[in-house]
Image: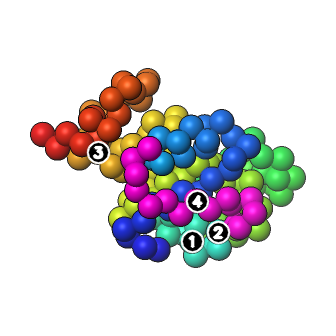
Amino acid sequence: MNDEKVIFWHDPALPASRAALALVSDLGLEVDVVPILERPPSADDIGAALRMLEMSPRRLVDRRAPEYAALGLDGEAVTDAHLVAAMAAHPSLIQRPVVMLAGKAVLARPPERALALFHPRRDEIPLDGLPHGLAALLDRRG
């Protein structure tokens, strides 16, 4: 994955994904928008994203997806490798959006979490809404 380009796993049907994409797009950076239901990531790509997210497959899988129950993914015997393979075969199992940049990633739920990748003090980003001067907030390197 290119460290200089934002990779955005997107589902245009989801309001949170559309909102996060709008926030990231407003920053003026090059964004590679990957509609993951049309271009599913490989198991290797999912593994790389999980490492960047510092997250287990069990935390990234969307338990609300119909495939979750249909494939019996809630069992204790289901391994991380099995979950990753299931997400690669059924991308609707991946919670989205996922935003990646420079070896880091966030699950942008709520959408404002996407901004954590672009702000030097991630803990200062308000997650309950952002002021209109978003660019000024993100440009401040204080």
What residue does disc 2 label? 41
- Identify the residue shown where x is 17% and y is 44%: 141
Which dot, 1 or 3, sits closer to the camera?
3
Q: Is residue 118 left or right of residue 19?
A: left
Residue annotated with mark 3: 119
- Residue 45 tag number: 1
Crowdedness near tag 4: few (<14), some (14–19) or many (≥20) residues, C-alpha within 10 Å: some
Q: Amino acid at mark 1?
A: Asp
- Of labels 3 and 4, earlier in sequence is 4
* Residue 30 appears in the figure: yes
Find numbered disc 3 in the image and state the secondary structure of the residue it sits on. Answer: loop
* Marks 2 and 1 in Cβ contact (< 8 Å): yes
Q: In the rendered structure, which amino acid carries the disc numbered 3?
A: His
Residue drawn where x is 50% and y is 69% of the image: 48
Residue 42 within the segment the image draws in magenta = no
Q: CA distance from mark 4 to mark 1?
A: 15 Å
- The CA distance from mark 4 to mark 2 is 12 Å
Q: Could you say where residue 91 lies in the image, as x and y percent from the top left? A: 72, 60
> Badge 2: few (under 14), some or many (20 or more) residues near its Cα, within 10 Å?
many
Rendering quarter of residue 2: bottom left
Q: Which residues are magenta?
A: 26-40
Q: CA distance from mark 3 to mark 4?
A: 20 Å
Residue shown at the point (33%, 49%) measured from the top left: 118
Quadrant including the C terminus: top left
Closer to the eye: label 4 or 2: 4
